[in-house]
């Protein structure tokens, strides 16, 4: 199953994030190896019946973090049609342009909204947005069969250059393990369950939502704090007046992501937030460092052929090309100020402006 839009999605702000402590070593290791999917001739996945879930997608072999599992064009795309009768007519016309085999692929997809309007029910259940916040959705033969988890093991991304949806492993996946994506991007468990029921007509029983109440309560408290921090970081006026506090919020948010085992697209945003904070105030040294982390994170989330990955790669060597450069000279320093002989811990202190140095 898949979805027409992402819920609780800070990505609508067009920001990106990075992972926590492990991102430095994890992303760098991935950068030095080719995608596993390019090395394997056999598919990394297979479609299976899943007890209590209908059809799902399962790993056919061990899959490494960063591997591209799928790269698939849509059968067709659909705009945000709010009137069901119009949607039915639109989909019927789209189906006429497909081959018989493609029509069967569409009709075999799950429908969480049974009734007379079967076509629109399938689309509502299975459409994926073609980019964060996009009103246009795509229907995919295989990717639309990937089931939901509030703590997924893959990232799904619309590649605007290839016009394909990609699926990348965001942690190591064992052979026989179900491949999952998230239909939403977080929030407390009650909110997640309510929205999943309202929008997709099923009760979420993923590993995260099925934890004991006392464990789930602690996680929910962290999820609330995550949203508070994300909102604060997105405050443009605060970025200008209190950049130190905004950067500190980025650091705390990454720490919470690590505790919550969040390794999806949200991770790609915070690094870009930190990059923007630094470059807005003229700090090319730290901006370049955050751009590198954003690039390496996007690399394993989306691949080298992603437009977002390529954009961050440019900012590594040319952070001043960002449109926000020069708004302030508060932290002004060139890339020559990037320290060369620090330990990993010392570099982290410098990066987050925690070190007792002249520019901190």
Image: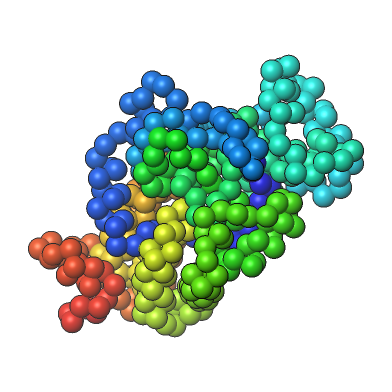
Q: Nearer the viewer, residue 106 or 265?
A: 106
Q: Is residue 188 left or right of residue 108?
A: left
Against 122, residue 234 (above or below) is below
Q: Position of residue 189 (x, y in %)?
A: 59, 66
Residue shown at 42% from the left, 55% from the top: 263
Q: Position of residue 331 (x, y in %)?
A: 30, 76
Image quadrant containing the N terminus: top right
Residue shown at 59% from the left, 37% from the top: 50
Residue 2 in view (yes/no): yes
Q: Is residue 6 left or right of residue 236?
A: right
Residue shown at 38% from the left, 73% from the top: 252
Q: In the rendered view, how is the structure colored?
A: rainbow
Image quadrant containing the C terminus: bottom left
Residue shown at 25% from the left, 64% from the top: 285
Residue 326 in view (yes/no): no
Quarter residue 327 falls in:
bottom left
Q: Position of residue 75 (x, y in %)?
A: 66, 29
């Amino acid at each position: 199953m898949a979805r027409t839009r992402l819920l609780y999605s800070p990505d609508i702000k067009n920001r990106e994030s990075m992972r926590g402590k492990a991102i430095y070593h994890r992303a760098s290791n991935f950068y030095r190896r080719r995608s596993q999917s390019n090395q394997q001739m056999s598919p990394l996945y297979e479609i299976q019946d899943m007890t209590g879930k209908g059809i799902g997608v399962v790993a056919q072999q061990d899959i490494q973090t960063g591997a591209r599992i799928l790269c698939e064009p849509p059968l067709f795309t659909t705009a945000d049609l709010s009137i069901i009768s119009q949607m039915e007519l639109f989909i019927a016309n789209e189906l006429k342009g497909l081959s018989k085999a493609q029509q069967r692929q569409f009709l075999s997809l799950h429908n969480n909204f049974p009734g007379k309007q079967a076509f629109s029910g399938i689309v509502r259940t299975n459409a994926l947005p073609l980019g964060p916040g996009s009103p246009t959705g795509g229907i995919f033969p295989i990717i639309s069969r990937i089931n939901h988890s509030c703590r997924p093991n893959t990232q799904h991304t619309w590649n605007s250059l290839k016009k394909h949806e990609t699926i990348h492993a965001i942690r190591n996946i064992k052979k026989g393990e179900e491949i999952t994506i998230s239909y939403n991007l977080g929030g407390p468990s009650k909110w997640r369950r309510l929205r999943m029921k309202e929008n997709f007509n099923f009760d979420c029983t993923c590993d995260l939502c099925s934890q004991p109440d006392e464990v789930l309560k602690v996680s929910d408290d962290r999820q609330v704090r995550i949203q508070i921090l994300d909102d604060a970081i997105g405050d443009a006026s605060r970025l200008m007046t209190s950049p130190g506090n905004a950067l500190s919020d980025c650091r705390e948010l990454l720490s919470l992501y690590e505790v919550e085992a969040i390794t999806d697209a949200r991770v790609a945003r915070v690094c870009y937030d930190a990059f923007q904070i630094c470059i807005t105030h003229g700090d090319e040294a730290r901006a370049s460092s955050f751009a590198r982390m954003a690039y390496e994170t996007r690399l394993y989330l989306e691949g080298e052929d992603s437009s977002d990955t390529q954009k961050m790669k440019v900012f590594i060597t040319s952070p001043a090309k960002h449109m926000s450069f020069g708004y302030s000279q508060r932290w002004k320093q060139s890339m020559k100020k990037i320290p060369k002989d620090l330990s990993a811990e010392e570099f982290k202190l410098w990066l987050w402006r925690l070190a007792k140095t002249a520019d901190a």
